[in-house]
Amino acid sequence: MRFSKFLKVEAEIVVARYALVSDETKSRFEPVIFFHPEFAKRSGVKEGDVVEVEANGRAVKLKVKLSESAPESGGIIPNGIFASYLTNFDGFKRFKANIEVAEGEPSSVGEIIERVKP
Amino acid sequence: MSFVCPGCSCLCDDIEIVDGRILHACRRGEEIFEKYKENRAKPMVKGKEVDIDSAIEEATEVLKDSKNTVIYGMDTTTVEAQQLGIELAEKLNAYIDDNSSFCLGEFVEAILRKELPTTTLEDVRDRAYVMVYWGANPFHSLSRHMSRYSYYPRGAKRPRGYEEDRFLVVVDVRRSETAKLAKKNAKFIQVDNDDELVDSFFKVMEGKAAKYAKEAGIILNEMKKSDLNVIFGGLGLKYGLKDLGKFVEMVRKMNEVAPLYFIPAGFHANMRGFNETLFEKTGYVNKYSFKDGKGDVDFAFTSLLQNGKVDTAVIIGTDPVSSLPYDVASKLKEVKTIVIDPRMSPTARVADIIIPSAVSGIEMGGTMVRSDGARIKLEVIEERDVNDIYILKKIEEGL
Ligand code: SF4
């Protein structure tokens, strides 16, 4: 077990369209977050880890990928159901979130739908 | 024969299908053409599959009983269907709104009200020199924008294309893929607060010191080399600005230096069509109440849901469960939801009534309006009789 699993770090999240993860048939949406490599290194997070991303009192689990296009102090969550679940209009496309390495599988679209309309 | 891709507001009209292969489309466009038969919606009422006419009849009955209806979406359907949707809203004395109320609607409104000068993408291709992508990353959001219309093409008056005849400016809070292209004859401005850059342009024009004085000075000087310069403003600009009026004033003032135009960058394929169609009818681009005879921020789909002002939502060709914050999307459980959509989207999955429709540009023809206002005619690959026009007409007749 890595030490970082016990640490929560604050990250700047940008929500942006990410053509490579959306599916135009609307049947799936990849639960992924793209961290800047420097941020990932500082935070003890590796590509392939699952992290819990918490903002506005809600949390989702996303799989970590790395991208140099991400903000240096955080990451990008692609525009879509996972980002929308975390945001409010105040900070709709850019917000602060708490990140923590997590156990288990990333969240599914079905899980979020279930929370929207139980 | 060429087809029009309905994947985004570029509406690329050069898509060819040869031996089943989709040519010229970007990844998203290719997927739209290749997979249009997948994940199709089925007619359903309260979780039970029914025939299409029963679903339409049930929706009509719900609308007859509704006291306060909102019609929402229609940014992926045709202008002809949008006209019917607006007619239906009028007949129901309902509210009507689309994604543009939290997307780039206010920029389109400023263009239609002639507050922001605009131009066409063909003129950009042929003549533009300075092109500013502000809060937009076309690499992901409008994948062929730069190759078809702006930076890369060799235009009539810009024969040397990006190598010598373009000056690229990218403004973003991060070094996006598009920002990484800003190397030679280019400038990347990493902002934390977009208003500070607006302020810097004003100050430089007044000869004063400013945070981004160097960058603003270079851009203003480069603009003088051309009779056509353009800002493509995206969602990053919309959410980065506190005061749209100040931005509009900045563009006006920069026009005293050299001609500068604005084109919104990036939205659903026919969002601008919705804005223009509603504007022609009511003088407002979105957030309109037929009951009150005016547009207002309180009539935005999001406000109506959050304030409990509606009992029924008709959601056409859009997916608020995926695109709106949880606080808004979760309110859908408090209203009767009728979804008209070709696909079993997350919103369709929480709907009370689902009416499956046709994919515009593949199964239904008609007109869409590109981001710059050009009207584009859609071709059909495989006509489907039950489309948005059929469904909306049937509902209206049944009321
Ligand atoms: S850029 Fe937009 S319209 Fe053009 S092929 Fe891609 S998704 Fe379709």
Image (cartoon, rainbow, N blue to C red):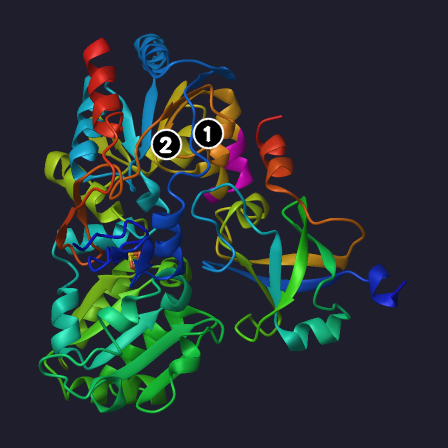
x, y percentage for residue B87? 17, 25
Residue at the image point whose x is 22% and y is 23% from the top: B390
- Image position of B171 with respect to B383: above or below: below
Residue B209 falls in which quadrant of the image? bottom left
In this view, the residue farthest toward the front is: B19
Q: Is residue B92 magenta?
A: no
Q: Which chain hosts label 1?
A: B
Q: Which chain hosts label 2?
A: B
Q: Mark on residue B181?
A: none
Query: Are the residues at dot 2 and dot 1 in contact (C-beta closer than 8 Å)?
Result: yes
Residue B187 falls in which quadrant of the image? bottom left
Alpha-carbon distance for marks 2 and 1? 8 Å
Q: Mark on residue B348?
A: 1
Can residue B291 be seen at all in this image of the molecule?
Answer: no
In magenta, the rendered stretch is B323-330
The 10 Å Cα crowd at callout 2, few under 14, some 14 to 19, many 20 or more, is many
The C terminus of chain B lies in which quarter of the figure?
top left
Q: Provide the residue designation for mark 2.
A: B341
